[in-house]
């Protein structure tokens, strides 16, 4: 049993690291501080309250690595919903199945992925939101989501007339034994299967990262692994956000050339990778250098 409460780790981190840079979208000039991320989460809370979302409702997220992917995930779990991350390279029929099988009521998605989906096949979805700017892409008949999102700033001013401050960061009290994540892995046969992940499962990885000082306040990391995979999500995202690390998100295909250029610019303190990426860097860059006549 993990002593640290998974959700309260983030309540504490957003308060303590308020002015530090939190998420940056690589090459797009967009950076959110911890305080700004907390404010974006608060806006989504207003949307969730408006729709009377309940503890345990499912919220699906699919798209390339960017700040709003992180914010959507964090808003869902700290609210008490269950987040359903979906691999962005799944085909549309798999995505339709996962959204329906998980009984997701909200979908946060990249615009280009939404263009490949058929809304009439998303049976329980009440609203779809863009990971570009959180605008409402689709609402179920009878919903008032588009109107609410357009007036979100006014709703924030009404809720926080003196401005949103670190003291306003108060997240749900939810024990670690509750399910907080449904992780749909690639299925060897048929459709992919959903794995139920509890707060203890998530907190175990994070407290390991904190205890071993994989990352610390003020460190920098480059996030290029798929966020719907547990490994990159656990350390590039969840551990990093819990300790006050600055995460730069690489939303492009991680080719060796792009990754090496990003490493040079970001100068990460820790690199979380998989063998395939390292092999590509070795074959396409390092081996070419050591095979040069002058080096030999």
Image (spheres, grey):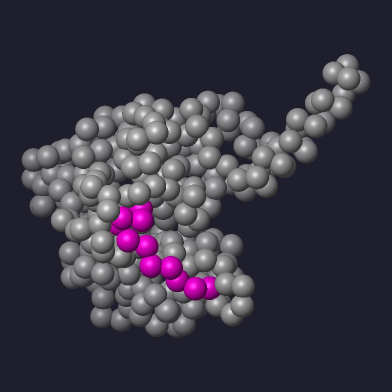
Q: Residue at x 20, y 37 (%)?
A: 15
x and y, in percent, of residue 219 in the image: 41, 28
- Residue 174 picture quarter: bottom left
* 74 lies above or below 53: above
Residue for point 53% across, 73% down: 192
Q: Is residue 133 above or below residue 35?
A: below
> What stretch of residues is rendered in magenta?
192-202
Q: Is residue 190 left or right of residue 281?
A: left
The C terminus - image quarter: top right
Residue 105, quarter of the rendered image: bottom left
Report x, y in % for residue 235: 44, 43
> Where residue 153 appears, x then y in whole percent?
21, 51
Residue 42, given in percent of the width and then of the height, sits at 21, 51
Residue at the outermost top position = 294
Asked if the magenta segment contains residue 194, the reply would be yes
Q: Residue at x 34, y 28 (%)?
A: 217
Q: Is residue 217 left or right of residue 89?
A: left
Residue that sits furthest to the right in the current view: 293
Q: Is residue 29 visible?
A: no
Residue furthest front as drawn:
1
Camera sees residue 194: yes
Report the residue at 58% width, 33% height from top.
262
Number of marks present in the image shown: 0
Query: Looking at the image, is 104 positioned above or below residue 86?
Result: below
């Amino acid at each position: 049993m993990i002593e640290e409460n998974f959700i309260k780790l983030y309540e504490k981190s957003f308060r303590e690291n308020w002015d530090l840079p939190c998420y940056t979208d690589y090459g797009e000039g967009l950076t959110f501080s911890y305080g700004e991320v907390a404010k974006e989460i608060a806006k989504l809370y207003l949307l969730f309250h408006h729709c009377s979302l309940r503890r345990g409702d499912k919220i699906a997220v699919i798209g390339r690595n960017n700040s709003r992917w992180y914010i959507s995930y964090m808003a869902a779990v700290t609210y008490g919903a269950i987040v359903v991350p979906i691999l962005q390279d799944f085909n549309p029929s798999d995505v339709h199945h996962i959204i329906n099988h998980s009984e997701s009521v909200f979908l946060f998605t990249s615009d280009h992925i939404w263009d490949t989906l058929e809304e009439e096949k998303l049976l329980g979805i009440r609203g779809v939101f863009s990971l570009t700017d959180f605008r409402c892409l689709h609402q179920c008949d009878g919903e008032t989501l588009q109107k609410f999102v357009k007036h979100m700033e006014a709703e924030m001013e009404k809720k926080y007339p003196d401005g949103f401050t670190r003291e306003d960061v108060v997240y749900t009290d939810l024990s670690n034994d509750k399910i907080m994540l449904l992780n749909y892995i690639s299925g060897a046969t048929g459709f992919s299967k959903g794995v139920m992940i509890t707060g203890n499962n998530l907190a175990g990885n994070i407290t390991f990262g904190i205890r071993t000082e994989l990352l610390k306040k003020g460190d920098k990391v480059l996030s290029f692994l798929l966020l719907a995979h547990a490994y990159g999500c656990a350390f590039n995202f969840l551990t990093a956000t819990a300790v006050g690390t600055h995460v730069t998100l690489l939303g492009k295909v991680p080719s060796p050339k792009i990754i090496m250029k990003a490493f040079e610019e970001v100068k990460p303190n820790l690199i979380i990778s998989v063998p395939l990426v390292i092999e590509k860097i070795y074959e396409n860059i390092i081996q070419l250098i050591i095979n040069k006549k002058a080096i030999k």
